[in-house]
Amino acid sequence: MDIQHYMTEVGRAARKASRAMAKADTSAKNRALELIAAGIRRDAALLTAANRKDLDAALASGLAPAMLDRLTLSEKAIATMAEGLEQIASLPDPIGEISNMKYRPTGIQVGQMRVPLGVIGIIYEARPNVTVDAAGLCIKSGNATILRGGSEAIHCNQALAKLVKEGLSGAGLPAEAVQIIETTDRAAVGALITMPEFVDVIVPRGGKGLIERLMKESKVPMIKHLDGICHVYIDDKADLAKALPVAFNAKCHRYGTCNTMETLLVARAVAPTVLPELARLYAEKQVELRCDPEAEKILTGYAHLKAATEEDWRTEYLDAILSVKIVANVDEAIDHINTYSSQHTDAIITEDYSRAMQFLREVDSASVMVNASTRFADGFEYGLGAEIGISNDKLHARGPVGLEGLTSLKYLVLGHGEVRV
Amino acid sequence: MDIQHYMTEVGRAARKASRAMAKADTSAKNRALELIAAGIRRDAALLTAANRKDLDAALASGLAPAMLDRLTLSEKAIATMAEGLEQIASLPDPIGEISNMKYRPTGIQVGQMRVPLGVIGIIYEARPNVTVDAAGLCIKSGNATILRGGSEAIHCNQALAKLVKEGLSGAGLPAEAVQIIETTDRAAVGALITMPEFVDVIVPRGGKGLIERLMKESKVPMIKHLDGICHVYIDDKADLAKALPVAFNAKCHRYGTCNTMETLLVARAVAPTVLPELARLYAEKQVELRCDPEAEKILTGYAHLKAATEEDWRTEYLDAILSVKIVANVDEAIDHINTYSSQHTDAIITEDYSRAMQFLREVDSASVMVNASTRFADGFEYGLGAEIGISNDKLHARGPVGLEGLTSLKYLVLGHGEVRV
């Protein structure tokens, strides 16, 4: 198989399909989503069988247990995929929305229309549900998409691809609007990220290693997510009835997610009160605390205590580990965050109005919170309906990326024969 | 001079200044703009003298007349720079604007705040007025900026840099918020576009050659403009009283601008009427018409007639040349545009409602117009107040880029101690 030739054909077909998708009716797009959902429910047993094949191959090749877990498509996961598509169908269509049409002194009227980006390439690892979520979001936002899933999930992805194509055709839309790369050859990824003539944006979903590799080689703009080094700062004007549950939830609700707190900052004035109380909560979960010298002193006797090194402030543990630092005040907390945060999500706990406002304005992260757990940084929790990922970038989409992040605004000018003088 | 070391110091200072600019008061930013404007008016003679030095050096080195023209800073141009800054001061401050704060079922309230991008690198050629326009837009939008002007304008740029620094300091803002690269060494550009740790976005302003070179090497996202292959389609339902002046203005108002029409499409049914009338107008300006066979036949006898080649549909002439093609209808016009246009600006002339709507929806360009000249595609004409450039990109900013294009949205979450369950 000539990969370069194959990918060029895929790219050309995607570009062509994107033209049809850009002008597709809302009803046709929703119909496609509903047909795919119905197909998934109908063929649940076939999908389970395909997934079984992938799991057997993965077991034989000794895939890590965490990857096996992600690869597994349970009955519940199959139902969730179908529901997800129906939810996307129920969201308002962002495409064609016209805003801010204003008359100018020359007589022309100028505003903007929301339009699809065109062709979106999505590169992801084991999880087969990404195939359906990504296809659904791209269909609704009027884009064509090229999906490159992990080779571990190839049987399941092929079975899902068939259902997606049936749904598109059933709704009168081009089947090539969603193409799933049929080869597991890595060269396909290299081709996908270097054909800007056919692909408008790449969304990589996977570990930091994958994304750093893609960043080096890509000739196509990316909406990407690197790491989540999230902070909670407990101010000396914090209400402890809020601070304790938030700081516990931000660390212990789930360890492996990007919006989990990795560093806790505590104002010096309240540290002797707050830290021992928090330590009692963390002790139940055996959370290891890596502390600066002041915090270490306060926490003497805690079973899982360690001294923090400079490296700890830069580390995303994704585990039952938390770095802890005492700061003088909100200014020092903001300085620390703007130095070490990955600009993902950071929160302050305070009852002080001015400090809350200062934190919201000055912390340079995609999500900035007052008196809430960092775990809320999520497309569904924010009301976007669904998300294709969380962006660490500043250009275009920042934070959770939903349907709107897959669109762009073009200018409209309505005239009556005006010319420029 | 160690360029890499120098640029690292410039980058570090810019990053630091960007923190101060992000939280600067609207009044301080406006004060800086007014002080710089006053300095420019006060030192007009000094600026003219500095420009004289640049012009003498350029003459001695045999710079092309077009470049000499751009390099020249007339008295009027100096006054216009000062006025431009005062206009920017009078625009609303986009930074800190909070929008769409909505309660979610969990109790948190979620919305967005407009924030600066951070550090903006601007690379441009001869024109010294870009130094002031770019500095002004970056100051107002709360960004720090690193400016790399053409070596031809170095004396003038240094004189302007001094005034900008005085204005910033006078308003209590860091002088490093606007840094002008003091060396004409080309390695400085190479360094600027490869330090994503200090620079958030690059705005290149210059010819296609410069931008294509930067695209290859840049490790920093770019807001860029390549070429402007703009179309006007005259539909068979066009009002000729609108079609003729618009088609004449779009080509002849200025030849060298990116929003000038380069290809005229005419519906077959009206071509025998429209083309001879238009040719009478174009003949006055001796516009060369490069025609497809049908149009050539209709225009037999026109003094500056040529047969168009495939290459003509892809060419930005920036000159008194126009390619002309007959099409069957609006569908064929849209197909031609979506194939050959540089996605800059395209217009339809029609009185037919459905065709106007179809054209607006289906033409995939940054600006799409009905019954108006493509020459209107411009930040000032659109009411943005000023522009840092026109973007051909789809991600982030599309079309004329004003203050808002130099900003981004972050998510705010206001809670009352909520945790995720």
Image (tube, coloured by chain):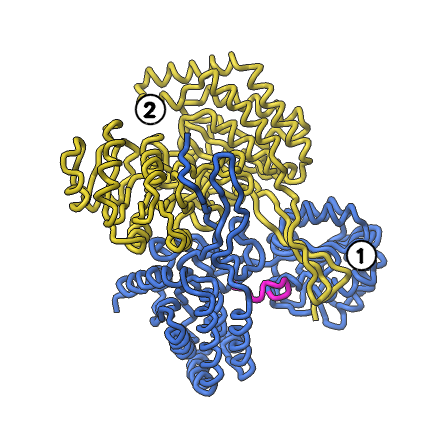
Chain colours: A blue, B yellow
- Which residue shows up at 82% across the image and 58% down it? A298
Give the chain of mark 1.
Answer: A
Residue B64: x and y in percent read 31, 23
What's under tag 2, amino acid-wise?
Ala
At label 1, the amino acid type is: Lys
**Span colored in magenta:** A380-388
The answer to whether residue A65 is visible is no
Instruction: Name which residue lies at 25% across and 36% down.
Output: B277
Specify the quadrant of the image occupied by residue B242: top left
> Is residue A131 visible from the viewing direction of this image?
yes
- Residue A398 vs residue B369, the one in the foreground: B369
Q: Quadrant of residue A332?
A: top right
Please rate how many residues cluster around mark 1, counting C-alpha atoms within 10 Å: few if below 14, some from 14 to 19, many from 20.
few
Asked whether B273 or B284 is in front, the reply is B273
Q: Which residue is mark 2?
A: B66
Where does the C terminus of chain B fall, quadrant-wise? bottom right
Residue linked to disc 1: A297
Q: Is residue A384 magenta?
A: yes
